[in-house]
Amino acid sequence: MQLCVILHDSMITRLPFVSALLLFLPPMLCAQDSSLEQLRAVLAERSAAGVAAAESAWEKHGSDFLKTGDRNLMAQLEGFKPEIQSPLFTELSRRLKSRQNLHEVPRIMQLLKAVLDQSSSARLLTLVPQLPETDIPQAVYSIIKHGAPSTQLHAQSMLASAKPRLLQSIVEATVLYANESFIPKMFQLIDYETFNLSELGAIFGILAERDFNQDFSFPESVYLISNTEFRIGLLELLAAYPNSLAAIYLIKESIEDALEPTSREIKIAALLAFEAGAKQFKWSRHQNKLQRFLKAEPQHRLATDIAHTLHRLGDKKGTNHLLSRPERDHRDNDGSWPYAVKLGTLQVELGLHSDAYKVFHGSYTKGIKNEQVRRRMKRQDFIWAARAAAGAKRPSVAYDWLSQSGLSMEELHDVADFPEFAPYLEREQFILLFSLDN
């Protein structure tokens, strides 16, 4: 069967090692198609040119980079990847073999780690036993990060004899870059007494942003760690992957005797994590703690955040707390427009569109004949009023609000992004209003 190869020219420039692969194709296949032979020649020529350029760049800048570690030089040399790997491995092997100028190894490794790929990761793994001990943890981290699954697995073979710093590098790189099936095992290997906790907290924060098909479990001692960066990362991870055993910890960190040092950031993160895991907790008992705190400390700096958490969990005590002041101001000022806007805007934010519609409609109807009131109406006010009407299933009123707003075509186009208008975007009047046909 004839072998046909079709590659765009731009693809060829991005695949400098394809030529090396084609050199090993059976001669019989190459003979079947002269175009393949021509392609192989082009690739080989480009690969050779890339290697020559990389070697020339290293000869020109390598010595200065090793002496100074200049970032600009490093960026220039990185631009010659992957071919720059060849002179880097030559320099590294020379120093490891002679055991001279080992003080330059960290800078060689710094650049090498920036240009690693799967094949060079496997090559670097064979040199790990010869590296200075201080360079091994970061080298292994990079090997796992860039290596193929087989290379990652070989790197894990160091776990049995790894010292804390190397152990942490293997664990962290594996949970971030290897197959997620390794995560349970890696979490069991975490040593919370010897690992760098700030770094571990950052890893937890990264994991929180990813989608895994599994839960994360922690020993109880984890909830006694006071390192700030670690606690923030842990709370972010608990918010993304709730743990049924963490409820007491989250309540303590948010409204009770939290670990020191305390901070608003930690308290808010604990509240959000508690909210995310509420379905897994014995909710009534912990709900009462939040309710009692809100009632006892209505002016506390966390009161509004706690009220929002309760509201999102369907607890009207939180909703009532948020609305109490705006409702009172609205009532005491006879529903005048500025106070109606403040109350109606909050009601829209809380998803209470029908209530917000009544507030906006009543105040507008009452004040529109007053020229002074009309002058106080801002264009942004009409957007909130229209969102209230649309959310209350009154699209024609929402259309009227926006038509009277004085907003530009560009501003109206952006208004279409608000979720309240989603059910009406296929209606002709809104298509024209929002310029959706452009």
Image (cartoon, helix red, strand yellow):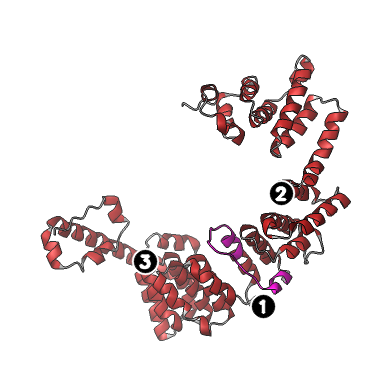
Please state if 349 lies on the left or on the right of 420 as rendered: right
Q: Which residues are magenta?
A: 204-224
Residue 260 placement, left or right of 145: right
Cα–Cα gap, marks 3 and 2: 56 Å
Q: Which residue is mark 2?
A: 313
| Residue 355 position by quadrant | top right
Q: Residues within 10 Å of mark 3 (few under 14, many from 20)?
A: many
Q: Is residue 175 visible?
A: yes
Residue placed under numbered mark 1 in the picture? 193
The residue under the point 77% across, 56% down is 284
Residue 20, magenta (yes or no)? no
What residue is disc 3 on? 84
**Cβ atoms under marks 3 and 1 closer than 8 Å:** no
The answer to which of 41 and 247 lies nearer the viewer is: 247
In what element is the residue under mark 1?
loop
Residue 326 drawn at (x, y percent) = 81, 35
Task: Please give the count of numbered marks on the rendered protein.
Answer: 3
Q: What type is the residue that disc 1 sits on? A: Glu
Q: Residues within 10 Å of mark 2 (few under 14, many from 20)?
A: some
Q: CA distance from mark 2 to mark 1?
A: 36 Å
